[in-house]
Image (cartoon, rainbow, N blue to C red):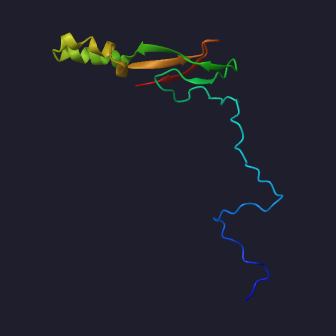
């Protein structure tokens, strides 16, 4: 079976364009500055996060608060019960025994929490 088309070079070959034809390099579109909205109660990490507050619609860096939890107090109680009372203060110093809560610095809206 014969084809009426001339043999085309393989797609991976690089040949200069014919005279009189200019080559335009396509650039990727610029990154948009449109912030991504994060819903309330989205999974958050222990560090402050950059996001858009769903309450005031501003792009923010969250304000974090570290709080002792019931788990913190239970670990301290376990240290006391098992005669490790000198170590009872350690859960209050360890970040793994505390929760981090994220708030909007502009409107003080609750954004989310990182629970350990």
**Residue 38 sits above or below residue 108 on the image:** below
**Residue 31 sits above or below residue 73 on the image:** below
At x 47% / y 24%, what residue is drawn? 114
Pinpoint residue 24: horizontal percent, then vertical percent.
76, 50
Tell me if 18 is positioned left or right of 83 in this view. right
Pinpoint residue 68: horizontal percent, then vertical percent.
39, 14
Residue 5 found in image quarter: bottom right
* Residue nearer the viewer, 60 or 104: 60
Tell me if 89 is positioned left or right of 105 in this view. left
Residue 28 found in image quarter: top right
At x 80% / y 82%, what residue is drawn? 4
Residue 69 found in image quarter: top left
Pinpoint residue 16: horizontal percent, then vertical percent.
72, 61
* Residue nearer the viewer, 81 or 31: 31
At x 58% / y 19%, what residue is drawn? 61
* Residue nearer the viewer, 83 or 21: 21
In the image as oriented, which residue stretches furthest toward the left? Answer: 83
Identify the image quadrant of the C terminus. Answer: top left
In the image as oriented, which residue stretches furthest toward the right? Answer: 20
Q: Please tell me how many numbered marks the rendered image carries.
A: 0
Pinpoint residue 13: horizontal percent, then vertical percent.
64, 65
């Amino acid at each position: 079976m014969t084809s009426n088309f001339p043999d085309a070079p393989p797609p991976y070959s690089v040949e200069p364009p014919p005279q009189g034809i200019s080559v335009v390099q396509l650039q990727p579109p610029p990154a948009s500055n449109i912030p991504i909205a994060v819903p309330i109660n989205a999974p958050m990490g222990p560090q402050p996060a950059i996001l858009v507050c769903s309450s005031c619609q501003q792009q923010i860096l969250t304000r974090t608060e570290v709080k002792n939890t019931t788990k913190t107090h239970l670990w301290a109680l376990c240290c006391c019960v098992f005669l490790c009372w000198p170590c009872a203060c350690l859960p209050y110093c360890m970040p793994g025994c505390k929760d981090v809560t994220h708030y909007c610095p502009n409107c003080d809206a609750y954004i989310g929490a990182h629970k350990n």
